[in-house]
Every structure is written in structure tokens, then in C-alpha cells.
Image (cartoon, grey):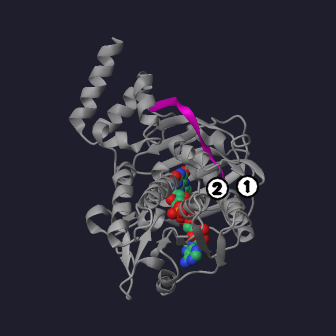
Amino acid sequence: MRHVVIVGAGQAGSLLALGLLAEGYRVTMVSERTAEEIKAGRILSNQCVFEPALRHERALGLNNWDDVVPPVVGIAFDAGMPGAQDPFISWASPLDVPAQSVDQRLKMSFWLTEFVARGGELHTHKATPEDLAGYTREADLVLVAAGRGPQFDGVFPRDDNRSPYTEPQRGISLHLVKHKTDFYQGVTFGLVPGVGEFFVLPVLTADGPRMGLYFSAIPGGPMDVFTGVTDHNQHLELCQEQLRRFFPWSTAAAEGAESGGPLEFLTGRIAPVVRHGVGTLPTGEHVLAMGDTAITNDPIAGQGANNAVHCARIYQQLILAHGDRPFDADFMQTCFDRYWDYAQHSTRFNNDLLAPPPVHILETLQAAQEHPEVAHRFAHLFNDPTDYVPWLADEETARTYLREVAARVA
Ligand SMILES: Cc1cc2nc3c(=O)[nH]c(=O)nc-3n(C[C@H](O)[C@H](O)[C@H](O)COP(=O)(O)OP(=O)(O)OC[C@H]3O[C@@H](n4cnc5c(N)ncnc54)[C@H](O)[C@@H]3O)c2cc1C
């Protein structure tokens, strides 16, 4: 029986672990935390997972929350100038199939418990880069799915050609508040040039439905105010203040809301980075990166968890198709290349959203207000970011499309 070791029990690692277990592989997962610790910990993400990724979770029978999670029904977009009371662009488009945000603490703790119940071997400790050589001696294949951060930098170096940013491009802040039933039950995406973005969406937590208030502030800009806040009530007050000041049309998302609790908020900064996905250890053995360990995006386009699912799906298909052949460096490179074939699109979409929007993109967002077809297409970039480059990366193509839409409805 082939033996696979996966370091990290998050969205990427757990999904691959459970997928391979179901196919008869021996799988060991190394998790720095127990299921109980994950469940009782601080929030991790806004984790909006769109339909193509949900399809893979459903195919593995890991969609336990379909009947209880509030469906994320669409995407609403508003853009306004700093100080304006009303947005100058405002539209909403339904998603063909709703997305979902199931609190990762709930999801990952359940999947970890399921992994053990289904016969997976769990080692609970924080793996170091030095531990990896030991795992390669025990297993046929070792994957590192330990999330973002510098801990495995020495194993998976940064790929400068694919990483346009060297610094974080946003100060990020998330707060889960007790449910407001009267707010739009999709993702609301607000943009104020020079200030940043605000997103709000319904989230299912272990304590019931919440709204996730997510602020994405341009570093050093007027909304970059969350660093160092440690009290949840003070954090929520700051959230409410930023909404009144920069996104007054969205204040209902937080006004009168109650904080989910002391662990229901986070602040931070994430430097987007694409790494070389195949690591060579000092022993000469190779290991393969997954999910955020391979490609870390700023959360602006809500693609990281989706990427993690697609990574698990792609790697699983390739592992199964490889049969009994050795999982050598060439095989690992093929896996990472196939993942990049997909993730280059979400990464480009994501990285472009961090830059000031060019005029043709603002024109497109403006046209979406008039033409539901344009709004629908833009909303579905979150489902399928492979449509981004063929459509919006090129100014002329974007304008031609708008002319065609206008001619069709004239
Ligand atoms: C505020 C915020 C909002 C976000 N919103 C969205 C969104 O709406 N949609 C979306 O798609 N993405 C979103 N993301 C990104 C998404 O959460 C991540 O991209 C995704 O969780 C990555 O999955 P992963 O499995 O690669 O890593 P993780 O989910 O980080 O999992 C890594 C796991 O490895 C464990 N681990 C770490 N180091 C070790 C070690 N040394 N040994 C053992 N275990 C270890 C960790 O404890 C963790 O359980 C958001 C992120 C943030 C921070």
C-alpha cells in the first residue's frame, strides 16, 4: 500500500488526505493542532468557497453543511469616492449556483476527526523543515500543506518571475458579527479608490450564522487603523467607524451588530508570493508544496481556499493516475505545473485587484450596472477566474466586449 505523508491539516491537506484514504492509500497527516484546538481557536479566514470547488468537496462526501449553511447567493459591487454618501457604481448579480462560507474552524476540525475515524494516521505536532527528511524515509510521497508564512521558505524558495509584489499590499481585518438578517445574503464588495475595499458575507460558524466583515486597507492609507487592536469590542467599533466614514451605503452590515466574541476577529498583512513548488532537502530527497504553502494570495479576491481545493483535486488525480511508479521530482514538478495552470489565473485576478483599477475595468464595472450580462460575467470571475485574462487583461478586448453587449441590447 502506498504511503503518503501530508504536513498541515487545512483546506488543502485535509481534502487530499481524505481523498487518498478513500482510494485505499495509507495516509499520515501531521497537524500542529488537535481538532478540539482548531475548533476552540481564533477565526482563520472568510473562506468563501465557490461552486467549482464545492463540487469537489461534494464528490468526496465532505459537504456536511449543505443543509444548514446560509447560501451565498450572489455578488454585489459598489464603488464610491472617499467622503461620498452614495456609490457611483452599484450593482448585484446572482451566482448561478450559490457559494458557501463554512467557518474553517468547524470544517477543519470536523475533517480531521473524520480523517482519524476513516483510518488515517494523525501525528499532532508542529513539523519543522528538518522533520521532512524523516518523512521521506517513511513514505512514498511527502507533501507540505502548512499554509502561508515563512516557515518552509528554505524548502520552497520564492519564484520572483511569478511574484510581482515583495510587500503586503493591504492591511487586512476580519470580524464575525451576530447575524443581521436584513443585509444582502451574497458577497458585497465595496471599493473606495485610495482607501481600500470592504467585503461582507454570511458565514456559518459552530455557534450559528454570522456576517463576516472584512476590511482591506491600503497600507498607510486612512483605513489602515486595525493593527495592534486586541479587544473585540474596540475592534468592532473601529469596523463600524470605517463603514460610516468610507462605506456609508453599507453601514447596515455592522450597525447595531454584536461581536461574535473575543476570538471572532483577526488583523494582519499577507505578502502575495508564488514559490517553487518542488523542494529539495539537504538529503537530496524531494517534497511537494500544496495550497498556500505553494501559492499565497492576498484574500482580496477570495481565492486562496478555492485554490487549495483545486490543488487537492489536481494532485489527487495525478497521484491516482501515476499508479505504482515512483513519486520522483519530475512527477512532483508535473503536479505543481498542473496546479499553476489553474492557479495562475486566480493569482493574476487577485494581484490585479490589488493595483489601482485601470479605466477599462472601471468602465466594465460601470457597464455592469446597466447590463446584467456584464454583471453576471464579472460576478462569475470569482467562480472561474480563468475568464479574467481573456476578457479583462487586455483593454481593447474588454472594450470590444462592452460594445458587443451594448449592440445586442440596443
Ligand atoms: C482574513 C482572510 C480571509 C480569507 N477569505 C477567503 C475567502 O473568502 N475565500 C478563499 O478562497 N480564501 C480566503 N482566504 C484564504 C484561505 O483561508 C487560505 O488560502 C486557505 O485556508 C489555504 O489553505 P491551506 O490548506 O493551504 O492552508 P491553511 O488553511 O492555512 O492550513 C494549513 C494548516 O497547517 C497547519 N500547520 C501550519 N504549520 C504547520 C506545521 N509546521 N506542522 C503541522 N501543521 C502545521 C495549520 O495549523 C493549518 O491547520 C482568506 C484568508 C484570510 C486570512
Quarter holding ligand 1: bottom right
The answer to whether residue 264 is seen in the rendering is: no
Residue ID at (34%, 49%): 356
Q: Nearer the viewer, residue 216 or 353?
A: 353
Residue ID at (51%, 68%): 145
Residue interval drawn in magenta: 89-102
| Side of 185 relative to 138 (left or right) | right
Residue ID at (37%, 67%): 332
Badge 2: how crowded within 10 Å, few (<14), some, or many (20+)?
many
Image position, residue 197 (x, y; %): 48, 48
Q: Residue furthest right?
A: 207
Image position, residue 291 (x, y; %): 47, 62
Residue ID at (60%, 57%): 174
Q: What amino acid is labelled 1 in the image?
A: Ser
Q: Which element is circle 1 on?
A: loop
Between the residue at mark 2 and the residue at mark 1, the CA separation in whole angstroms equals 7 Å
Q: Which residue is mark 2?
A: 175
Instruction: Label the magenta part by its dominant secondary structure.
Output: strand
Image position, residue 39 (x, y; %): 72, 64
Q: In this picture, is 91 found above or below 212?
A: above
Looking at the image, tell me whether mark 2 or mark 1 is earlier in sequence order.
Answer: 2
Image position, residue 280 (x, y; %): 36, 80
Q: Residue 259: which numbered mark, if any? A: 1
Q: Nearer the viewer, residue 177 or 88?
A: 177
| Side of 133 relative to 35 (left or right) | left
Q: Which element is circle 2 on?
A: strand
Q: What amino acid is labelled 2 in the image?
A: His
For the residues bearing labels 2 and 1, Cβ distance under 8 angstroms: yes
306 part of magenta stretch = no
